[in-house]
Image (cartoon, rainbow, N blue to C red):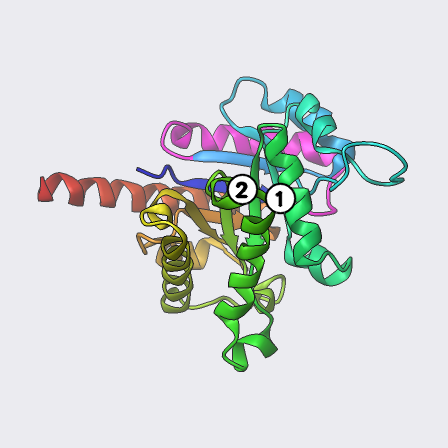
Amino acid sequence: MRKPILIANWKMNGSLHANQALLVRMLAKLRPFRKTIDMVICPPFPYLFQVRDLLGYTGLSLGSQNASSAVSGAHTGEVSATMLQEMGCRYVLVGHSERRSLYQESNANVAARHKQVLATDMTPVLCVGETLEEREQGQTMTVIERQLQAVIDASGLEGLSSSIIAYEPVWAIGTGKTATPEQVYEIHRAIREFLDTRQAGTGQSVSVVYGGSVKSGNAAELFQSPEVDGGLIGGASLQADEFALITAALADTVAEAGSLCGMLD
């Protein structure tokens, strides 16, 4: 059974004081959910050590917002996967829509970064998704399949299977717009079907989470689908109360699914 997961992407936000205040409040609120939900905090690079120490033995994991496609060398401004692993990171975001659009990370470049994360035994969180124009042209799955296939070409299906896939429609990132539960179900199901065409059963073994303006007000309906294994949370993860409410919504969904399985048994 795939364990639900929530990944907090702080993006380029925070300060030493603000980080500590946020995590102290957040950790207290998340305590009841630690056994049933995996939770990851991805702060900006300068705060990795601070957040690692604050997480301590809480059960929450440390993640990075990116990793270089290079192992080492003359790559000013880049941070290698080996460095991140040494800092205590267990997860790394790769291919976030903001990296693809603002910094021109191509499918091949994202796949190279993904490969470096795998090589250090961390879990890549591969972000895939379409722009509004691509959706309106009916190209959503064509775009996503290219993004997935680039990783398969670089690391094999096994490499992709060792990842978490985050579906984040670009048109719903930071815009306040959110995909409907029906749209999310459709794309998550299509991602699993694509993986199954490469090898039967792969689609059900990979965790697929949703990212795109998830808030406490829409989390419950987004998480209701059995195809959705959790969320990649942006702005809402900078508010302890809001993130805790999203976590509770996911926990309620898990509990309902467990009760249903018990009835069927």
Q: Disc 2 marks which residue?
A: 7
Q: Can you give x and y, in whole percent of width and height, for residue 123 in the image?
A: 55, 35
Magenta segment includes 178? no
Helix, strand or loop status at disc 1: strand
Foreground pick, 206 / 28? 206
Q: Can you give x and y, in whole percent of width and height, for residue 87 in the image?
A: 70, 23
Q: Which amino acid is tagged 1?
A: Leu
Determine the residue positioned at 76% across, 33% down: 71
The answer to whether 232 appears left or right of 264 in the picture is right
Q: Write the start and end of the magenta stretch as one range.
A: 11-37
The answer to whether 265 appears left or right of 164 in the picture is left
Q: Nearer the viewer, mark 2 or mark 1?
A: 1
Helix, strand or loop status at disc 2: strand
The answer to whether residue 16 of the structure is visible from this angle is no
Asked whether the residues under the numbered discs 2 and 1 touch, taking CB atoms below 8 Å apart as contact, a structural biologist would say yes
Magenta segment includes 14? yes
Q: Can you give x and y, in whole percent of width and height, for residue 120 in the image?
A: 63, 28
